[in-house]
Image (spheres, grey):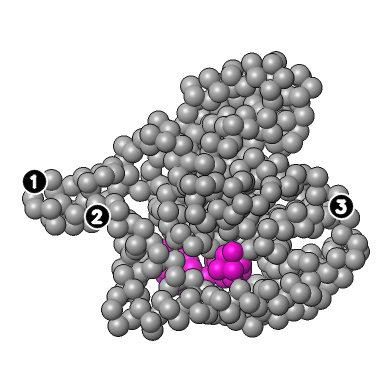
Amino acid sequence: MSDLTNLTLAEARDLLAKGEASSKELTEAHIAAVEAARSLNAFITETPEKALQMAEASDKRRKAGEAGVLEGLPIGMKDLFCTEGVLTTAASHILDGFHPTYESTVSQNMWDAGAVLLGKTNLDEFAMGSSNMTSHYGGVENPWRKSGDNRPLVPGGSSGGSAAAVAARCALGATGTDTGGSIRQPAAFCGIVGMKPTYGRCSRWGIVAFASSLDQAGPMGRTVRDTAIMLEAMAGYDAKDSTSVNAPVPNYEAALTGDIKGMKIGIPKEYRIDGMPAEIDQLWLQGIKWLEEAGAEVVEISLPHTHYALPTYYIIAPAEASSNLARYDGVRYGLREGADGSLDEMYEATRGKGFGMEVQRRILIGTYVLSAGYYDAYYNKARRVRSLIARDFAQAYEKVDAILTPTAPSAAFGMGDKMDDPIAMYLNDVFTVPASLAGLPGISIPAGLSQDGLPLGLQLLGKAFDEETVFKVGGVLEEAAGFDATPAFLAA
């Protein structure tokens, strides 16, 4: 690990601004770190030549006085964002060889802000998973290890490649997408910060779709400040996305004032689930104490439909996935199998070989709940329950400014564990899914270590389009936690 790769994104930005290093030097250090960390399998595609070209162009812009918000900063891009001319796979066999002829709006926003692409990071296939074990390109290893135990652990999912890359010092930051917790849960497992903004804050145009009413792009970094800087570059109205909201993008970094005196923080009693590990509960209590010591008032609140959130999510998300993934038929994108047979045989062969088991499971679930006779019984009922969950949050925010919960019900688990029990895997998202269904912003902040020496996260949730409050409270929580532990694996 070099001095340059150990910088936070904000520190690297300031170093470049002072002229004490160039983007090319910073990028070369991170390219070496990506190569040194290949055993983690965090990247599906590395783009070193493109990165150096972008870095040299950035240095020229800086000399010309044209520096953007992310000028010259090397980052990883989750391989769910379409990137012009660069292989985009969604970690699926069915998109083999797909080189988009266009750029996603979020990635284009980041290039316009001066960011440098190190490569495309690994993920669960089509973002379906909580472990990063469903990728066609193999699972990602978490750079952390349990104390005295060298067995590999999962980084969480689906943005596990991005989380592992940031934690291992391969990238200053990375993009993720969050459908039911896919930014916040891997951030907690890898000891970094992950932010899911309000649905509609970032454009979904050019992001490979999983569940369209839930998918949202967001930043992952090593500090709250880093994610605030990144989100300002990523966010914004996009006429190409009908769900994009035309609202001003604030200067999120300016919200980090450290002053939360008088703010009210809600503690939802329904999040104290049966069987929650004592260390998770203790960390949550510690987080409450930190915020009280900073001058906030803690208020117990009720979100009565919380226990319906997970089953509701696993009806709505597969239903939308089964519809979205119908477009992958061997005709328009990537893989084609059985081309010598009939059209139906070609469809069957392509989808049978192109999709992994978890994707096939969700397509089947989604097709079932949308089928005649079951649409009202399952899908429409789930939509009504979703409205009740959103109403719970709206009523809670009449009393409080933000809500504090654990991020995940456990620390990172072993690679291969829980793979034969999809229900146990789905429970990893139990604390993150409710806010996803309500479309609210949330952030995970590393706040402590488990008894095994693994990072644990706390989650802060905010009102719609009030990311500033989430960042403000998150900054206070981060400072109080003082989390400075590092993973066993750091890129040389």
**Disc 2 packing (10 Å; few <14; some 14–19; many ≥20):** many
Is residue 428 rendered to the left or right of residue 232? left
Question: Height in image: 77 above or below 293?
Answer: above
For marks 1 and 2, give the CA distance: 15 Å
* Image position of 118 with respect to 24: above or below: below
Check contact, mark 3 vs mark 1: CB within 8 A. Answer: no
The numbered mark at residue 340 is 1
Tag 1: residue type? Asp
Residue 268 visible in the displayed image:
no
Q: Is mark 1 on a helix, strand or loop?
A: loop
Q: Which is nearer the eye, 421 or 184?
A: 184
User: Dividing the image into 4 quarters, which one contains the C terminus?
Assistant: top right
| Residue 64, quarter of picture | top right
Mark earlier in primary sequence (1, 2): 1
Which image quarter is the N terminus in? Answer: top right
Sort mark 1 into few (<14), some (14-19) or many (20+) by Cα contacts within 10 Å: few
Residue 433 on the magenta span: yes
At horizontal 44% and vertical 66% (from top left) the residue drawn is 317
Residue at the location (73% across, 24% down)? 16
Q: Do the residues labelled 3 and 2 touch (CB within 8 Å)?
A: no
Q: What stretch is highlighted in magenta?
A: 414-439
Marks 3 and 1, the one that precedes in the sequence: 3
Query: For the view shown, which residue lies furthest in the left direction?
Result: 341
Give the residue pinned by disc 3.
258
Q: Quadrant of residue 375?
A: bottom left
Residue at image mark 2: 351
Residue 353 in the image: above or below residue 2? below
Residue 43 belongs to magenta span: no
